Image (cartoon, rainbow, N blue to C red):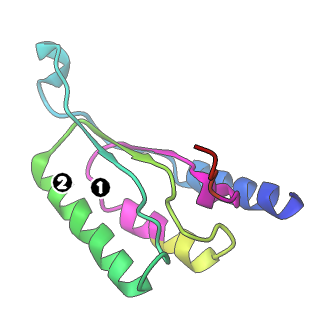
């Protein structure tokens, strides 16, 4: 449990240190509408590490081309919260977004096993 807590703190500290910086799409505030992109399970290190990074970079390019107002990444940002390289790589690729990005940690990000209860 102690390792899980430290993994969680490390990830939260890294995300807070980088912050979520960006600007909204011009005209969005005056039109009353907005667009967002929702991602999940970037999970760097889940399969072939280099392929995971390549796929995440491709998603960043596709999302940037659509120009949403913001992005939400819903958990499992990396596969192993103790992997400092994966956390740094996630932050580096995430920095490529041209709009604000909000991240929510998942079970892999805090070191908890998946819940198998149905």
Residue placed at 30% from the left, 39% from the top? 70
List the residue tagged with mark 2. 64
Residue range corresponding to the magenta coloring: 90-113
Residues at marks 2 and 1, CA–CA distance in whole angstroms: 6 Å
Q: Residue furthest front?
A: 118
Report x, y in % for residue 110. 68, 56
The magenta stretch spans residue 108? yes
Residue placed at 37% from the left, 76% from the top? 52
Report x, y in % for residue 89. 47, 74
Disc 1 is placed on an element classified as: loop
Residue placed at 38% from the left, 60% from the top? 95
Report x, y in % for residue 30. 14, 14
Question: What is the tally of numbered marks visible in this picture?
Answer: 2
The image quarter containing residue 29 is top left
The magenta stretch spans residue 62? no
List the residue tagged with mark 1. 97
**Image-based side of 78 in relation to 73, left or right:** right
């Amino acid at each position: 449990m102690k390792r899980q807590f430290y993994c969680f703190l490390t990830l939260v500290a890294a995300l807070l240190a980088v912050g979520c910086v960006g600007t909204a799409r011009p005209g969005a505030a005056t039109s009353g509408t907005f667009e967002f992109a929702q991602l999940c399970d970037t999970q760097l290190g889940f399969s072939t590490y280099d392929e995971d990074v390549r796929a995440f970079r491709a998603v960043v390019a596709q999302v940037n081309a659509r120009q949403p107002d913001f992005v939400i990444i819903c958990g499992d940002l990396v596969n192993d919260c103790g992997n400092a390289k994966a956390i740094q790589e996630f932050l580096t690729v995430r920095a490529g977004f041209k709009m604000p990005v909000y991240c929510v940690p998942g079970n892999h990000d805090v070191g908890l096993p998946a819940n198998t209860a149905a």
